[in-house]
Amino acid sequence: MTAFLLGKGIKLIMLLVAVSILSYTLISFSPIDPVQSYIGADMTLVGPEQREAIAAYWGLDEPMHEQFLHWAASVLQGDLGTSLLFRSPVIAVIGEKFLSSLVLMGLAWILSGIVGFMLGVIAGMKHGTWVDKLIKAYSYALASTPAFWLGLLLLMLFSVWLGWLPVGLGTPAGVLAEDVSLMERMKHLILPVITLSVVGVSNITLHTRQKLIDILNSDFMRYAQTKGLKGFSLIYRHGLRNISLPAISLHFASFGEIFGGAVLAEQVFSYPGLGQAAVQAGLGSDVPLLLGIVLFSTVFVFIGNTIADILYKVIDPRVRKGAGL
């Protein structure tokens, strides 16, 4: 296990270096002027000397490779820089925004796992029937539905037409955060959570369905059926562990999808999370914040994939033996 984690650590370092270089290179081709984004739309209020002073203050007058080296040296010392848009340290901005995103992604991740697993079990038990075909069609439809389109549809239906739920934001407009009740926060989370949970439902459903079908056709399940077990009692006693643990490990591997979907969901519902901050940083050419979010999201997704790898090795002894664990 030590060698496995050490290898993962080396891979993470190499991945962060590659992502940093690639991201900084792509940002250098951005047509957005960071000085203009810092000043605002009306550039006539600031003279040429002041613009040059602002560029020198943020180090934007240096060649791109020197900017990257200075930024990389600061990152190695634990300093991700200062956000041009929020006028705060990048670490503080990411910490604040990630807490909001973590609630959204956590609820959506749990909901998609529970719903997907239940639908997969039902489809596997009813293999070949109209119930199975309906769940399969539903899963394929979810897999091909863009998250932002579904979010807009839910927004129009439940917020604009019916008026049951808030249009967006994380809290009611014009109300201080400390005065917002838990119930009001949950109401603002309902539509974003439903939209984001759709991302992972289809994968879990189809995987669990196929896994359960394979298990039901195995020899030990046929033997259990000859002993009189059938229906849900058969699945509960002999099949639940075999289908639940692989589904859990697969669900941990979906951290990248859930994070990418959060960017779209937060943008549609104007939810103040890390995804919306990434969009603002990109449009505003806030290089320190954008790179900080990229590095943070890379580590977040890598941790999810690492947990999935560990679960696979714990579940399947053949994988564990092949990896030398």
Image (cartoon, grey):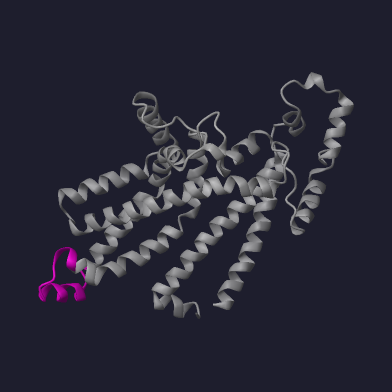
The image quadrant of residue 272 is top right
Residue 42 in magenta stretch: no
The image quadrant of residue 151 is top left
Pick whichever, 272 or 129, lies toward us.
272
Pick whichever, 268 or 171, lies toward us.
171
Q: Quadrant of the N terminus?
A: bottom right
Horizontal relation, residue 66 to residue 280: left or right: right
The residues colored magenta run 216-233
Q: Residue furthest right?
A: 49
The vertical placement of 166 against 303, above or below, is: above
Residue occupying image coordinates x 36% and y 67%: 245
User: Which x, y percent locates residue 276?
Assistant: 57, 38
User: Which x, y percent locates residue 163?
Assistant: 37, 26
User: Which x, y percent locates residue 48?
Assistant: 87, 25
Residue 223 in magenta stretch: yes
**Main structural element of the magenta stretch: helix, strand or loop?**
helix
Residue occupying image coordinates x 77% and y 50%: 71
The vertical placement of 304 against 280, above or below, is: below
The vertical placement of 13 against 148, above or below, is: below
Residue occupying image coordinates x 37% and y 50%: 111
